[in-house]
Amino acid sequence: MKFASVALSAVATPALAADISAAAVARDPHLQWLRKWRQLRDEFNDMDGEGPEHAATWEQMGDLEELICITPATTAAGILAQFQFAMPEHGGYIETGTVWKDLDGKLFQNIETALKAVG
């Protein structure tokens, strides 16, 4: 491979990745919603008291939770975001370890790994 080709691919790859990433978010916003929800959750947990900012953040989190849960994902990345939202190690609500030999936990780990691989 010639130097010009290598240099061009080194410059084009980040831009192409950004375009692909932007296109995926436009098609399936679940990952963006999950990132925003996590940011708000962290901010909420750091807040003191029950003021208007506290209530507004709580309401925004609820709106995002609803979007994540009721909007069908259309990409593997979107499905992964929904799955991670539900899993406790990502701050979610599914309880694992209730099946013999922690088979449910192992199943969910395998699903997450597969979604990352195809996403």
Image: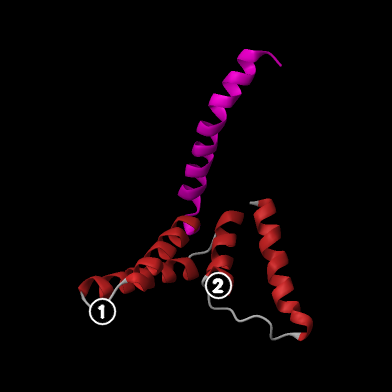
Instruction: Return the residue nearer the eye: 46 or 93.
Output: 46
Question: Which residue occupies 43% across, 66% down?
Answer: 67
User: Which quadrant holds residue 95?
Assistant: bottom right
- Amino acid type at circle 2 is Ala
Going from the N terminus, do you reach mark 2 or mark 1 first? 1
Residue at 47% over, 62% down: 34
Q: Is residue 111 left or right of residue 93?
A: right
SS of the residue at dot 2? helix
> Vertical placement of 58 versus 98: above or below?
above
Crowding at dot 2, Cα within 10 Å, few <14 / some 14-19 / many 20+, comes out as: some
Q: Secondary structure at mark 1?
A: loop
Q: The disc labelled 1 sits on which kind of residue?
A: Gly
The span picked out in magenta is 1-30
Q: Residue at x 45, y 55 (%)?
A: 32
Image vertical order of residue 51 relative to residue 98, above or below: above
The circle on residue 84 is: none
Is label 2 in contact with label 1 (beta carbons under 8 Å)?
no
Question: Label 1: which residue?
Answer: 49
Where residue 5 sits: x, y (%)? 63, 17
| Residue to which mark 2 is pinned | 86
Residue 75 inside the magenta-drawn segment: no
* Quadrant (top left, top right, bottom left, bottom right) of the N terminus: top right
Q: Residue furthest right?
A: 101
State which quadrant residue 11 falls in.
top right
21 or 100, nearer to the observer: 100
- In the rendered image, residue 4 lying in the magenta stretch gets the answer yes
Q: CA distance from mark 2 to mark 1?
A: 27 Å
Against 9, residue 91 (above or below) is below
Q: Nearer the viewer, residue 18 or 89?
A: 89
x, y (%) of residue 50?
25, 80
46 relative to 87 in the view: left or right: left
